[in-house]
Amino acid sequence: MLTPRGWWFLFIVLIQVGLGALLSDRIGSGVAVVGLTLLAWFLWEWAHFAYRLYFVAPTLTLHRELHDERKAVPILWAEGEFDVRVRVSLAGTGDLPYVALNDWVPADADLVSGSDEAVVALSAERPAILRYRLKCPLPGELRFEGVRVRIADRQGFFYHRTLIRDGLAYYVLPRLTGAEGHRRGSKKFNIFPPPGVHRLRRPGGGSELLDLRDYIPGDPPKMIAWKPSARKDKLFTKEFESEVPVRCTLFVDTSESTRLGTKRKKITRLVNLAAGVAEATVADRDHAGLVVFDEHDARVMRPKRSRRHVIDMLHLLAEAAGRPTPFGPFADANALARLAYPLASEFYPELMHRKANTLPPRMFWSPPSDYRRGWWVLMFALPFLVAFGAVIALWVGWAIRSRDLISLAAECISFFLNIADVFRVWRFGLPWPLEIPLRLLVVTAPTTLLAIILWLSHGLSGYFEPWRSQRLRRKQLGLLFATLDGEPVGAESHYLHDDQMFARRAQRFLAEHHARYPVRLYDARGRYLFHGRPKLDVLVKALNYGVARGRDNELFVLLVDLIDLADDLDHLIRAVRVAVARHHQVMIILPWQDDVPDPPREPPDEDRIPLRKAERFAAGGYKAIADELSRDFIDHFHRAYFKIRREFGRLGVLVIRADSREPVQMVLDRLDRLRGVGRRK
Amino acid sequence: MSTRAAEQPNVFHRLRPPATLNYVFLTGAGLLVYFLIMGSRGNDAGALIAILVAVPGVLARWVVAPALVLILTTYLLVDPGFMNLVGTFTRIPWTLPHEKAAFALEDVILAAALLAYVIGHFRLTALVHQGMPDDPTTRAGRDASNPPRRPLELVAEDELPRTLIIGGSCVIAGQVAWIVLMGLEGLGGPGVFSPGTGRFLLTVWMAGLALMVVSAALIYMRSGQMTRLEASLVLRDEYFHENRRETDRLQRWRKWFKERVATRRRARK
C-alpha cells in the first residue's frame, strides 16, 4: 500500500519524533511537535486511503457495451470496426479522488481511435466513461478481461492496483463478404430464381434446356428434339438442367496443426474461406452444410439455406477459430512461468499479492537432503558424526556398564586420536573429558568444514537467481492455479514439483486469457508432434455420415490440412472413393503455409542427390545448415502436396491450395467450374 | 491518458493554472512562515538553505527535498545557527537557551508551516511531475518516460479548504499529543530514566501503539473485504508453509516413482 515515497516520509517523521522526544529536555519541544504533527497528518491520510480502499473501491462496477454504427451488438464481425463504451462507476457512498483506469484491450484487436485509459476522480454521481474504437482483424473470440484500476492518494504516499473483472467474450464472426459479389456467373440470366430452383449444368428434370445428345434407345419420345433430328437426319434427345438445389457441405479442419503459429493463419484462412463459400452458396439459394472437426470429434450442421442457418454456421466457425493454440505433449515449465507470472499479476492482483500469496525467506532455502548432493554433505560430515557418536557411546556405555559398547567406542576414538598423533595435532593439556573431544574436533574439522560449506552453499543457492525467481513464480502461480480450480488442499505442491503438470496448467491459463505461448513442435528425435492422424478418422466418419445421408448433387468441400499426412491417406481415399461412386463431388482445399513458396508446375524429381553437402556446410557454417534445412522442408512440403494431388486426382477430385492470395471468389469460381463439369453418359 | 509525450508543457506552464497555483501559494506561505520562525530563533542561514533546497525541489521533482528540509530543520532546532558546528572548529562552543515548556506557540506555528510546505510539495509533485508510482505492465506501448500525473481537472474546488482544515486539526492533534505525553510523564513521578529518555520511550510506545492500531484496523478491514477466493488462497498458503517440508518429501518420492514407471515402460518397449 505504501509507496517508496510514503515509506521514506514515514521513516523520516518517526526519526524526527523519536529524536525530538529524546532531546526535548535539552532543546525544547519544537522537533517533537513538528514530528508529531506530521505523523498525525500521515496517519490520517493512511486511514483515509484505507477507508477508500476497503470500503469504497469494492463498490466499483463495470458496464461494457460494444456498438456498431447504429446500436449495441452482441457479436462482432472480422475486419469490422466497432466502438467500445466502458462505464466505471461507484455503487456506494464515498469517492476516489485519483484513479487511473486502463481497459484491457484484447490482444487480437487493434485500437483504431480513442483512448483505452483515463485518469479520473470517481464518485457515485460522477462515473468514468472510456470510449474507443477497435478493429478486429481475425475471426474467433474477443475476450475483455476487465479494467485495470490504479488508486492513489493525492500525495503519492499510498497506491493500490486492482482489476475490475469483466471476462466478457464476444464472438467475432468471419466477415460477411456480400453475397451479391459472389453470385455465380451462370445465374446472370436469372436474377431472381424461385426458391429451390437452381440452374445446375447437369442433366436433370428441370425446364431449362441444357444440351442435345445422341438418342439412346429407351429415351422417352417426348424428349426427342425433332427439329435438329430432322435437320441432321439423326435422332437427338434433349437434356434439361437439373432443378435440384446443390447441397454443399464444408468440412473444416480445426485440428491442432491448423491452430499453430503466432497469427494462426491456417485456421483463420480455412474459416474465412468456409464462411465465404457458405455465404455465397446460400445467396445462390443452394444448401450449405458445415462439419467442424478436430482430432476428437466433429460437429455437424446439416445443409440448409436460411439466413439464420448462415449465422449459425458463422458462429460455429468463429467458435472454431477462437480455439486456443494447442498445448503439445512437452513444454518448458520455466519459460511458461515467465510468461504466465506477469499476466497473473495483472489479472489477479489480489491473489498474487505478497500479503496473501506469501513468500517468506525460509521458503527459498534449498536443503541438500532433498537432492543427491545431500550424500556428499553426509560423506564429509561422517568423520565428525562417527567421532562424536563414539564419545556419546562411551558415556552411554559407562552409564549402563556395557563393556562391549565401551570397547567399541574406545576403538573408534583411539582411531581418530591416532590420526591426530600422525598429523601431530597440538595437545591442549586439558583434563581428558575435555581434551579428547577437543582433539577429535580438530581432527575432524577439515571434513566437517567442507560439509558445512557444501550444506550452506547448496542451501543458500535458493536465494540467488535464477533459482529464486523460478521458485517464487512456481509457488505463487501454483497456489493461484490450485485456488482458481478449487483443487484439494496440497495440490499446489504438485505444481511446484511436477514440471509437466505445471506447464500444462500454465498453458491452459495463458490460453484462457488469449495470451501467446511457445509450443514445442518436435520431440527429442526431431519428429513432428502435430501430425493429427486421429483427425483423419474423424473426417472419414463425418464424410461417410454425409455420404450416407446425402442426396443427389452433393458437393463435399474438404478444407483440411493434409500436408503432414500425405503418407496416411488410405482411409480418406477410400471414403472419397465411396462419395464419388455415389455420384457426389469432392473437392479438397489445402491451407498453404505463408513461408513456403508456390510449388513448381511439375513435381520435383524423386531422387535428388545432394552433392558436396559436407563441404557446403563446412564453408557456410550454421547459415548453410539452416538454408539446407529450410530447403529440405520446402521440398518435403511440395512433394507432399504433389502426392496428395496425384492420389486424389486419380479419383477425379480437385485439390487446390488456399494461400494468402487465394480469395473466396477464386474458390467459388473453381466451385462453379466444378459444377459445370457434367457427367455425360 | 491525459498526458502525451508530444504535448508536455514545461514545469512553469504547469504551475500556472489555478489548481496548482493554490498549492504554490500554500507551499510559499509555509516556507515564508518557516523562514520567519526559524529566523526568530537565529536560524536565518539555515532556513535560507532549507528554502534553497525546497524551491528547486518543487520545480525539479526532488522527492527527497521535504526529507532534506525536515532533517535540516531538526538539526537547526538542535543546533540553532550552526553555532555548535562552528564551535567545533573554532573551539568556542555556543549554545542558545531553549524554551522547555510543553506548549510554545512558535513550535505550533513552525509545525503548521512545515506541514503546509510538505502538503504543498507532495501535491504539486503529484500534479506536475508524477502522481503514482510506475507500475510495469505486460502491455506494450506504454510511455515509461511519461509517468501518470494527477490531472488538474481532478482538483476539486473544496480540496484546499478541506486540506487546511485537516492540516489545522493535525497541528492541534500533534500539540495535544505532546502535552498528553508530557502529562503522562509527569504522572509517573521521578523514574529511573532521564526526562528525555522517558519521553522518548513514551513517544516510541505511543507511536508504536498508533501504528499498531492502524495496522490492526487495516488487517481487520482487509480480512472483512476478502472474497471467497482470497480467503481460500490465504488458507492454502498457510497450509503450504506449514507442510512444505513434508509435501516436498512426498513429491520427491512421487517423482522417483514416476521415473521408475517410465523406465519400466521404456524397458518393455
Image: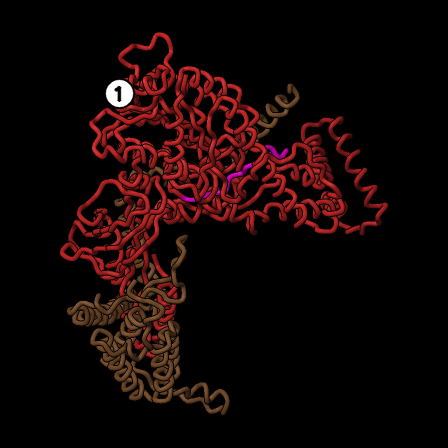
Where residue A294 sits in the image (x, y, percent)? Answer: 43, 27
How many numbered marks, from 0 up?
A: 1
Q: Which residues fall within the magenta stretch?
A: A515-527
Q: Is residue A518 magenta?
A: yes
Q: Nearer the viewer, residue A130 or A77?
A: A77
Place residue B50 in its image quadrant.
bottom left
Q: Tell me the element at label 1.
A: strand
Q: Quadrant of the C terminus of chain A?
A: top left
Q: Residue furthest left?
A: A125
- Identify the colour scheme used: by chain
Q: Position of residue A254 (x, y in %)?
A: 42, 32
Residue A421 percent location from the top left of the image: 84, 45
Above or below: residue B69 compared with residue A311: below
Instruction: From this view, report whether residue B82 is shown above or below residue B22.
Output: below
Which image quadrant: the N terminus of chain A?
bottom left
The chain whose colour is brown is B
| Residue A97: quarter of image | bottom left
